[in-house]
Image (cartoon, grey):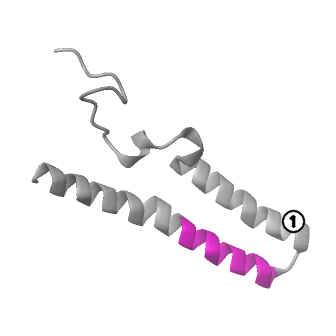
Amino acid sequence: MPTPEPHGPGWLPGSVWDLKPWWCQPWSILLTGLMVIAGSWVLLHLWWLTAGVSVVIAAWWLLFLVLMPAAWKRSQAEASGN
């Protein structure tokens, strides 16, 4: 039996990242966060501001790289009855 074409009828994603565009992949989220942290330091040279930016970026990473994929995986397991 042929494999269903991605995003076609009968296609099931293997992970939440299969559903996201290229700019919302783990590598782009990490790279963007690192660039924002580095940019904060390079432009402002204020350690306390860069530390605050780092905390916000770390929360963003936690949400989108850890919690959201775990919740998606849990919902998929519940939907399939596993």
Place residue 78 in its image quadrant: bottom left
Place residue 49 in its image quadrant: bottom right
Q: Residue at x 78, y 84 (%)?
A: 48
Nearer to us in this view, 47 or 21: 21
Judged from this view, the residue extending furthest toward the left is 81
Name the residue tied to disc 1.
Answer: 42
Q: x%, y% of residue 67?
A: 40, 66
Q: Which residue is drawn at 25% across and 58% down?
A: 75
Vertical comparison of 2 with 9: above or below: above
- Magenta stretch, residue numbers: 47-60
Vertical comparison of 8 with 67: above or below: above
Magenta residue check for 15: no
Q: x%, y% of residue 47?
A: 80, 81
Q: Residue at x 70, y 80 (%)?
A: 52
- Type of secondary structure dominating the magenta stretch: helix
Q: x%, y% of residue 50?
A: 76, 76
Judged from this view, the residue extending furthest toward the top is 1
Q: In this view, does 60 lie to the left or right of 3?
A: right
Q: What element carries label 1?
A: helix
Locate the C terminus and report the quarter of the image it occupies.
bottom left
Magenta residue check for 53: yes
Place residue 71 in its image quadrant: bottom left
**Residue type at mark 1?**
Val
Q: How many labels does the image show?
A: 1
Locate the N terminus and report the quarter of the image it occupies.
top left
Judged from this view, the residue extending furthest toward the bottom is 48
Badge 1 crowding class, 10 Å Cα cut-off, few under 14, some 14 to 19, many 20 or more, is few
Q: Which residue is drawn at 71% across and 74% down?
A: 53
Q: Is residue 14 left or right of residue 60?
A: left
Nearer to us in this view, 35 or 75: 75
Q: x%, y% of residue 18?
A: 41, 39
